[in-house]
Amino acid sequence: MTHPLLSLSGVRVVFGEFTAIDGIDLTVDEGELRFLIGPNGAGKTTLVDVVTGRTRPTSGTVTFAGQPIHGRGEHRIVRAGIGRTFQTSVVFEELTVLENIDLAAHFRLGPLALLRRRRGVTPTVGGVLERTGLAPLAGAPAGTLSHGQRQWLEIAMLLAQGPRLLLLDEPVAGMSHTERERTGELLTEIAADHTVVVIEHDMEFLRRYARDVTVLHEGRVLTEGTVSQVQADPRVQEVYLGR
Ligand code: ADP
């Protein structure tokens, strides 16, 4: 039996005169690998911002693991077990891959742990390096990584925070074919023991790796289903695929 890990109910986000999220109800079950698609401006990033505490909903509720989290600050939400990547990179260029992952692990533990930080002492770091295929690059400064390796480092930094729910923003954007394949395998592997929500536009990637898809349009959920179901929906073709 599945249990909802994340539930949004009647979530609205209004910026001045503009309604970016217009009453979203959404449930993500424990263990799901959910893709979030929709044209530019549909509200995908705002939705993730609401879940991660970056933006307060104007109204509505967000529940994670049975606890209401709307209105909590970003750091408390990380500690509750929700982690995200951003479209823009947040790695420290001059630190090594290992140091970046170690810092991320300490971030979860809070400011005191950051102050007491000792290099490479966090036991989870080794496992995360192996899992993401970054072990051979552990000593390399993050600034020397390729685009794909950098994206994997960001996923590794998330994993080091021990989240139950990972929110990934366009993880294959700008990647080569081989890097996409590797990322797809990594996502599938991570989804075996985490709940994962991915914003992604790349339809070929979705067809290959997505199970359940939620389509947003103008701040609302347009439809939900498998990739083939949503692709066959004429409303989705009209607003998103444009064909
Ligand atoms: P998506 O990620 O689907 O492209 P966004 O969530 O980024 O969409 O944006 C949804 C809409 O909300 C867009 O029209 C955007 O311009 C608007 N928006 C997002 N953030 C703000 C903000 N801080 N102030 C005003 N409008 C915003």
Image: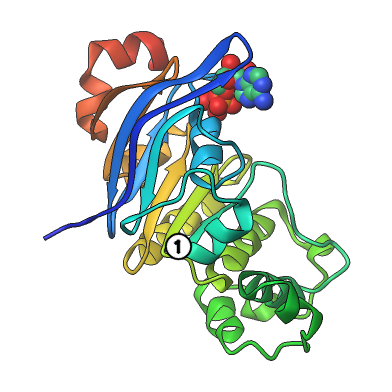
- Give residue 119's position: percent from left, percent from top: 78, 87
Q: Nearer the viewer, residue 216 or 173?
A: 216
Q: Is residue 243 visible?
A: no
Write down the quadrant of residue 225 in the picture.
Answer: top left
Q: Is residue 137 visible?
A: yes
* Residue drawn at (35%, 61%) of the image: 191
In the visual, does 10 lie left or right of 19? left
- Give residue 32's position: percent from left, percent from top: 29, 53
Q: Nearer the viewer, residue 26 or 195?
A: 26
Secondary structure found at label 1:
helix
* Residue drawn at (57%, 60%) of the image: 76
Judge whether 155 appears above or below 115 on screen.
above
Picture quarter with the N terminus:
bottom left
Picture quarter with the C terminus:
top left
* Residue drawn at (31%, 66%) of the image: 192
Crowd rating for badge 1 (residues with CA inside 10 Å; few <14, some 14–19, many 20+):
some
The image shows a total of numbered marks equal to 1
Judge whether 242 appears above or below 111 on screen.
above
Tell me which image quadrant ligand 1 sits in.
top right
In the visual, does 157 lie left or right of 89? left
Q: Say which amino acid is labelled 1.
A: Leu
Write down the quadrant of residue 160 in the picture.
Answer: bottom right
- Give residue 97's position: percent from left, percent from top: 73, 72
* Residue drawn at (38%, 38%) of the image: 61
Q: Nearer the viewer, residue 90 or 139?
A: 90
In the visual, does 35 lie left or right of 201? left
Q: Which residue, as the protein is rendered here, is positioned at the far right?
A: 94
Judge whether 61 appears above or below 181 on screen.
above
Write down the quadrant of residue 104 in the picture.
Answer: bottom right
- Give residue 20's position: percent from left, percent from top: 52, 19
Residue beneath disc 1 = 186
